[in-house]
Image (cartoon, helix red, strand yellow):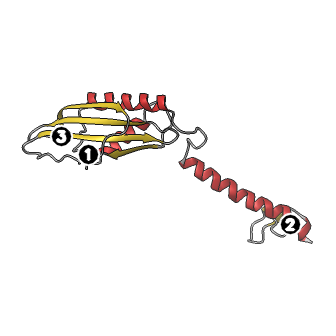
Amino acid sequence: MDDDRVFIRSRWGTNRYVYNPNNPIGRALIVGSLLFAAGGMYWLYHPDLFKGGWDEGELRSAVRGASAELSRGAQSGPGSFMFEDILERRIAAQPDGPSDGVSVDTASSVPVSDPWAGGAEKADYTVTARGTDAAFCVHVDAWHRAKAAGYAAVTVTADEGACATAG
């Protein structure tokens, strides 16, 4: 008798209606609800899913904007903890493209300077993005202060093409 109705009363002590799993339409609604919820959760963590990828002009503008921003701040340099992630977040935060799909790889050895003596730090990073074959080489030159936190000066420049890897 309950096979013909799409909704039935719950048997768990409540007086509410639920989908009827014995009815083919009710079963389809159960599966559809689960797929809809799973798709919503996936979209929640991938908001740029339907926006597509980067194009070369967007990536160029975002890399140059992030380079200028990092040069002005002089807070982070190539010897900073997780500088690749800092650079990646700054590029993705630029208003020119999607907020994900950027990849930053170290193309040179990561510099280590003595915090007591200070010194020069230099590193190169290759920036690529989903949706384009363009690559940019970001050169970071910084002067670490002696016996102090932060950098006296940071210069970040970007060139077209991938960096030559350290061999």
State the image quarter where residue 119 is shown. Answer: top left
Measured in 3D between alpha carbons, the distance from the residue under mark 1 to the one under mark 2, in whole angstroms, is 63 Å
Which secondary structure, mark 2? loop
Q: Is residue 116 visible?
A: yes
Classify 153 as above or below 2. above
The x, y position of residue 40, in whole percent, is 63, 50
**What residue type is disc 1 on?**
Ser
Is residue 59 left or right of 86 when viewed as pictured? right
Is residue 2 left or right of 145 when viewed as pictured? right
Measured in 3D between alpha carbons, the distance from the residue under mark 2 to the one under mark 3, in whole angstroms, is 69 Å
**What residue type is disc 2 on?**
Asn
Q: What residue did someone put label 3 on?
A: 121
Classify 165 as above or below 7. above
Which secondary structure, mark 1? loop
Is residue 121 left or right of 96 when viewed as pictured? left
Q: For this rendering, which residue is in front, 141 or 3?
A: 141
Q: Which mark is residue 161?
A: none
Measured in 3D between alpha carbons, the distance from the residue under mark 1 to the one under mark 3, in whole angstroms, is 11 Å
Say if mark 1 contacts mark 3, CB within 8 Å: no
Disc 3 crowd rating (10 Å Cα; few below 14, some 14-19, many 20+) is: many
The x, y position of residue 23, in whole percent, is 86, 66
Q: What residue did someone put label 1 on?
A: 108
Classify 37 as above or below 163. below
Q: Is residue 18 visible?
A: no
Disc 2 crowd rating (10 Å Cα; few below 14, some 14-19, many 20+) is: some
**What residue type is disc 3 on?**
Glu
